[in-house]
Image (tube, rainbow, N blue to C red):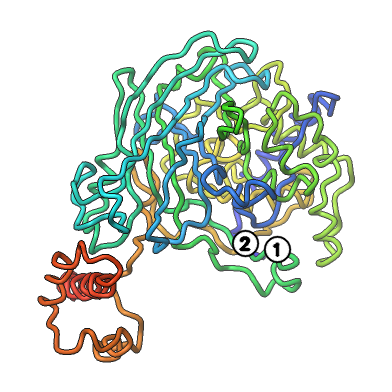
Amino acid sequence: MTSTSRSGAGRRSIATLVCGALAAGGLTAAGVAAFAPGAASASSHREAPLISGQPQFDNTDLYAFVSPDKPDTTTIVANWIPMEEPAGGPNFFQFAEDAEYDIRVDKDGDAQEDLIFRYTFKTKTKNDKSFLYNTGVVESLDDKDLNITQTYDIELIKLKNRRAVSKTKLADDVWVAPSNVGKASMPDFKKLRDEAVYETASGVTTFAGQADDPFFADLRVFDLLYGADLSEVGRDTLKQYNVNSIALQVPSEAIIESHDQPITGIWSTTQREGADGQYHQVSRLGMPLVNEVVNPIKDKDTFNASSPVDDAQFLENVTEPELPKLFEAIYKIPAPDEPRNDLVDVFLKGVKDLNQPPYVTPSEQLRLNTSIKPTKKPKRLGVLDGDTQGFPNGRRLTDDVLDIAVQVVEGELLGAKNDLGDAVDKNDKKFGNYFPYIGLPTAGSRGKTVEGNTTDSVRSGLGDGLTGASSKDNTMLIASSAAGGAGGFLLIATGLFWWRRRRNERAYY
């Protein structure tokens, strides 16, 4: 495992900062579950037994950062539905209607949410007699050919002692950007994505829809830590997979206690409606890599249903983490001495004089100091490399949280300097310069036939029904066979195939 080296000055400055934080206060009974940083596991991709079978409700990653082009605002990106195969039709990827998707905010560091931004979704189908997600080329979000559409509402809930004291509707019936079926169906997907960005009357900007998965990592860690000989590193396992994203940009002053206390804590949750008509929390995510490699199997589902205020129950998972022992057994890298107070203090409280709230209650959430302005040249190793605007002070899309986590778990903050990593240092797609910043999703069709296939071989494989028919004839068969039931299915499908193929040839060659 390798990573790009960083300046010694940057390393010394953050080490001094962190060591000061550790000396300022030890682990107490209030300490809680945590980031025992791990090797490559996406932040929450199929991380617990129950949620792995419920992808619509599964949080994958959470990001929070001061907006680079609007530094008086904070942008929060929360993702769901892991490992979306771009060509995963005909039922593409939708938010669940029987769910509450929440972004929760702790303004004062007491491990209790003060604000909840709640997203709820509705689905509409124009023609349920068709099997298609879109029945033609889609050029706008209200296009008649976008057969299945979603909209959402946003409700702002203010709480005191975890009880709601007010509820305000921030947005109503906002369009969701669709799944990117392919270039034949959605030739200008960026236009559709831009249409899905909505600014509310209260100054909140929002987006919901499909996006490229911004997490970059080599997930072959589970093959006994990269093949037991480091032969399995350097491949971004999440390349060309998509997720469903919710992005929210809010004035920073709305999510902090005061200008004198500009640090906020953020996590996301999903509640699913049960048979009793009540909503029950089934997924939770704050800091990356917690429920994958810190909590043992027996605690994973419990963690997903829990709240930060109750995190003391997971304390031993942090102070006596399993991962360093695994590194020692396989690679003979000595595991740091336990208990691991360095992990508890830095990742559960925040770094003192950087993103640790006064009178903080240790708990697992993503903490951000909103008063630190964005740098024009972010460093992928964030605070470890002297870039105090990066992880673990919030989390930017470009932060290499996997390498940071591995280096810290192997004792970086305890004097065991290392440059460990998975050799995946950046995302496969570029991020945007303005909201919602996330990359466009990979299209379901790539616009090319399989290598080695010729027109004649594909025709032969589809059967004799195409023999002698021109592409124009086949296109016309789509309309004439629309009501033909099962008997017309092959003609519809092959007609679509040839129409789209010819369209792609014109577009790409």
**Residue at (47%, 25%) from the top-left corner?**
117
- 132 with respect to 479 (left or right): right
- Distance between the Cα atoms at labels 2 and 1? 7 Å
- 251 with respect to 421 (left or right): left
Residue 247 visible in the picture: yes
Up-down relation of residue 328 to residue 449 (above or below): above
Could you tell me if the residues under marks 2 and 1 are in contact, i.e. CB atoms within 8 Å? yes
Q: Which mark is residue 219?
A: 2
Residue 7 visible in the picture: no
**Residue at (71%, 47%) from the top-left corner?**
37
What residue did someone put label 1 on? Answer: 222
Graded by Cα atoms within 10 Å as few (under 14), some (14 to 19) or many (20 or more), the crowding at tag 1 reads: few
Looking at the rendered structure, the kind of residue marked 1 is: Phe
Q: Quadrant of residue 187?
A: bottom left
Q: Quadrant of residue 359?
A: top right
**Residue at (60%, 20%) from the top-left corner?**
113
**Residue at (62%, 68%) from the top-left corner?**
233
Looking at the rendered structure, the kind of residue marked 2 is: Leu
Residue 365: x, y in percent?
63, 32
- 120 with respect to 139 (left or right): right
